[in-house]
Image (cartoon, grey):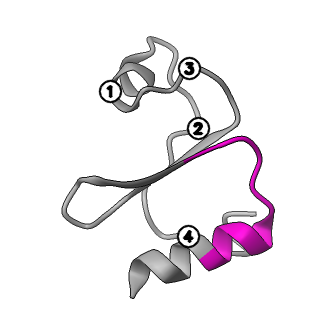
Amino acid sequence: MLEDLKVDKPVILSDPYGKAGKEYGVYGLPMTVFIGADGKVKEIVKGELTGKALKEKAAKLLK
């Protein structure tokens, strides 16, 4: 999916020690955290996102 969406930013797929989870308040999966170029959390989506919804949210945040 990441290749199809042409995502060229870091994606956390594994967090064996829970560091990123604690930092961003991840207490369940799936969960998507959108982080801006400034390093700040822009939006947190708990639950599954379709590819279409992910594209729309990313496009909105990139404007």
Residue at the image point whose x is 50% and y is 41% from the top: 12
User: Element type at marker 4?
Assistant: loop
Badge 3 local density, few (<14 within 10 Å), some, or many (20+)? few
Amino acid under disc 3: Tyr
Q: Earlier in the sequence, mark 3 or mark 4?
A: 4
Residue at the image point whose x is 80% and y is 62% from the top: 50
Task: Tell me the CA gap for discs 4 and 2.
Answer: 13 Å
Badge 4 local density, few (<14 within 10 Å), some, or many (20+)? few
Q: Which residues are magenta?
A: 45-56
For residue 56, side relative to residue 18 (left or right):
right
Q: Earlier in the sequence, mark 1 or mark 2?
A: 2
Residue 57 is covered by the magenta coloring? no
User: Element type at marker 1?
Assistant: helix
Q: Is residue 40 above or below residue 25?
A: below
For residue 59, side relative to residue 28 (left or right):
left
Which label sits in the foreground, 4 or 1? Answer: 1
User: Element type at marker 2?
Assistant: loop
Query: In front here: 57 or 51?
Result: 57
Residue tagged 4: 7
Query: Do tag 3 and tag 4 residues touch (Cβ < 8 Å)?
Result: no
Residue tagged 3: 27
Quarter occupied by residue 39: bottom left
Amino acid under disc 2: Leu
Query: Do tag 1 and tag 3 residues touch (Cβ < 8 Å)?
Result: no
Query: In front here: 7 or 32?
Result: 32
Q: Is residue 61 above or below residue 20?
A: below
Quarter occupied by residue 19: top left
User: Element type at marker 3?
Assistant: loop
Q: Earlier in the sequence, mark 4 or mark 1?
A: 4
Quarter occupied by residue 4: bottom right
Residue tagged 2: 13
Residue tagged 1: 23
